Structures are given as structure tokens and as C-alpha cells.
Amino acid sequence: MNQKRTDTKTATGFAAGSSHLTTTSIAGTRTTFCLNGYGQAGDLQAFGDEVAAHRPEPESSIFYFEIVGTLTCYCTTGMDALGQTSWPRTKQGYANMHRLYGTSNLKANRFAFLAYVAKDKSPARDAFASITAPELSIWTSDEVFASARAWAADQ
């Protein structure tokens, strides 16, 4: 995979300006963000809350889902940070986005991963149904994707 790093940018208001996000362009097709060892437990939730607070529903929960889904590093550190976020709000945001705008393969992969980490089978199963191909930047391998999909399908 051709991976190109670009400038590190400070997120306004993120943990009182003390944390940084590293922008990574993967194969020139999209941008993902990964916390790069900065900040404290709960910073991802605080940033999501801060940004979403300035918008009415359903945009508020959609922004929250987008922040959690985009800023999560799909690694052990990122999964630990997810424990500090609001799963009900993330789930509501994805549902609102899906209802109002539809979804993309990338967003369905993100949400399926988040539901898998939250151990919430029903929304994970629904998200897997929308996935046309695994995003290996999220799942790391076809085997991990297949295992998570099998878990979600098991009732």
C-alpha cells in the first residue's frame, strides 16, 4: 500500500489544543486521521461532544459518528479510546446518516467495526449487509473482516 504522510495539524479545541492529529492520505483516495500518542483518555469523546454540541439533531449525532469513525485509529490504542466514547450517540448518528443520506462502503465498514468493538450484533449485522468490500485499512486483513462478519451473523 502506498502511504503518504502530510502535515500534522492541531485540532481546534481538541483537548484544549494539547493534542495533534496526523493526516494520512492512503493511496491518494481518502484521508483518515489517527491519534498519534497525544492526549488523555476521553479526549476523543470530548472533541466529539464539543463539535456536535453546536449543531441541532440529526446533524449533531451525525457529526459525532463522523468524528468517532474518522478519528479512531483502527489499532489497539484506537480501540481503547472507543471505550471512552458514547456508543448510543455513535449508533444514532450512523442511523440518522443512513436514513437521510445513505451510506458508503467506507462508512459501513467503519460502523461495522465500531459495532463489533461495542459488541452490538444487530447494528453490526445491518452494517455488514451494506458492505460491498472490506476496507483493509480498518480490518487489517480479510480474515479479521470475515471473523467479525461471522460473529455478527451468529444469532
Image (tube, grey):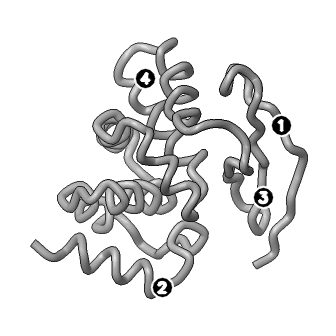
**Amino acid type, mark 1:** Lys
Nearer the N terminus, badge 4 or badge 3?
3
Badge 3 crowding class, 10 Å Cα cut-off, few under 14, some 14 to 19, many 20 or more, is: some
**Which residue type does callout 3 highlight?**
Ser
Helix, strand, or loop for circle 1? strand
Residue behind mark 4: 60
Residue topped by disc 3: 25
Amino acid type indicated by mark 4: Ser
Can you say whether 104 is above or below 153 in the image? above
Which mark is first along the chain, 1 or 2? 1
Quarter of the view holding residue 71:
top right
62 on left or right of 78: left
Q: Earlier in the sequence, mark 4 or mark 1?
A: 1
Residue 129, image x, y percentages: 28, 67
Q: CA distance from mark 4 to mark 1?
A: 24 Å
Q: Nearer the viewer, residue 58 or 21?
A: 21
How far is mark 3 from mark 2, CA to CA?
A: 21 Å
| Number of the label disc, if any, that sits on residue 142 | 2
Residue 128 as seen in the image, left or right of residue 120: right
- Check disc 1 and report the residue beneath it: 9
Q: Are marks 4 and 3 in contact (CB under 8 Å)?
A: no
Q: How many angstroms separate mark 1 from mark 3 (CA)?
A: 14 Å
Describe the element under mark 4 as helix, strand or loop: helix
